[in-house]
Image (spheres, grey):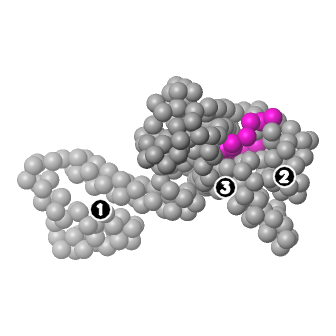
Amino acid sequence: MTSISYERLHQNMQNLKLETMEAIVDNYLELAASENKSVVEILDHLFEEEYRSKNNSAIETRLRISGIPVKKTLDEFDISFQPSLDPAVINELRTLRFVHNAESVCLLGPPGTGKTHLAIGLAIEAIHKGFSVFYTTASSLLDKLKKAEQRGQLDKMIKTFAKYKLLVIDEIGYLPMQKEGSHMFFQLVSKRYEKVATIFTSNKPYGEWGEVMGDPVIAAATLDRILHHSTTVSIKGESYRLQARRRAGACAPNTHETIGGTA
């Protein structure tokens, strides 16, 4: 290889932003020569390393801007603790077909039963598969929508939330929406309906959403869209946190204490 070719090779890698390839090419070419690797094998290795580096960087970026508060993977979820969960259903959700098909997933159950963990785990799986993802609690979402409405930018804000391939709306039912909020929530659900996927978590059964949203009619219309193409996962077990406190002797074995915080 001439010095001109060598310099041009590195310059072109810089121009094409092939940082990983440029960093490893010299050492790898020496190794490849000693092992009599073919040109195709050399190119395959260099491009594979470049792709892996860029893909990992993209995943980290999507994780950073997703709003996910804490990294909880599906592999870390103890499904054996919740007998009401069907592993086959969780495995089906893990394929992310619901994201490809722009469907909804509703995770329902008492606080502390793992709804948020499952939602975040699915969101992280989607991020690793290249989907744009955003996580928000219902109260934070409504706060953003209300502030946008006050600025005359509600439509713009709804379009922003509607663009994500997967939106996680956590903790529906922990705080009442009020009628104004329920109308904005309905607009967002309608905007995403049959276009992109959404995961909802709630501590309330569907029959109580009218009370949560402060308007039974709007609640019915919202649920009609959510449930048209959806999977509902109902968790009937006890709280992970409550069990941990029992083990630590912090509460009586038969207590019905409700632990606050993220479900």
Label placed on residue 137: 3
Q: Residue at x 50, y 56 (%)?
A: 70
User: Are the residues at dot 2 and dot 3 in contact (C-beta closer than 8 Å)?
Assistant: no
Q: Position of residue 261 (x, y in %)?
A: 60, 54
Q: Position of residue 190 (x, y in %)?
A: 81, 46
Q: CA distance from mark 1 to mark 3?
A: 41 Å
Magenta region: 193-207
Q: Position of residue 14 (x, y in %)?
A: 35, 71
Depth order, front residue of 110/42: 110
Q: Earlier in the sequence, mark 1 or mark 3?
A: 1
Is 205 covered by the magenta stretch? yes
Disc 2 versus disc 1: nearer the observer: 2
Q: On the image, numbered disc 2 is attached to which residue?
A: 182
Depth order, front residue of 107/263: 263
Q: CA distance from mark 2 to mark 3?
A: 14 Å
Crowdedness near tag 3: few (<14), some (14–19) or many (≥20) residues, C-alpha within 10 Å: some
Q: On the image, numbered disc 1 is attached to which residue?
A: 21
Q: Earlier in the sequence, mark 2 or mark 1?
A: 1
Q: Is residue 248 visible?
A: yes
Q: Earlier in the sequence, mark 2 or mark 3?
A: 3
Which kind of residue does numbered mark 2 sit on? Answer: Ser
Q: Position of residue 118 (x, y in %)?
A: 55, 42
Depth order, front residue of 241/104: 241
- Relative vertical location of residue 30 with respect to residue 72 in this rendering, above or below: below
Which kind of residue does numbered mark 1 sit on? Answer: Met
Quadrant for the N terminus in the image? bottom left
Disc 1 versus disc 3: nearer the observer: 3
Is 92 covered by the magenta stretch? no
| Label 2 element class | helix
Which kind of residue does numbered mark 3 sit on? Answer: Thr
Q: Residue at x 82, y 61 (%)?
A: 155
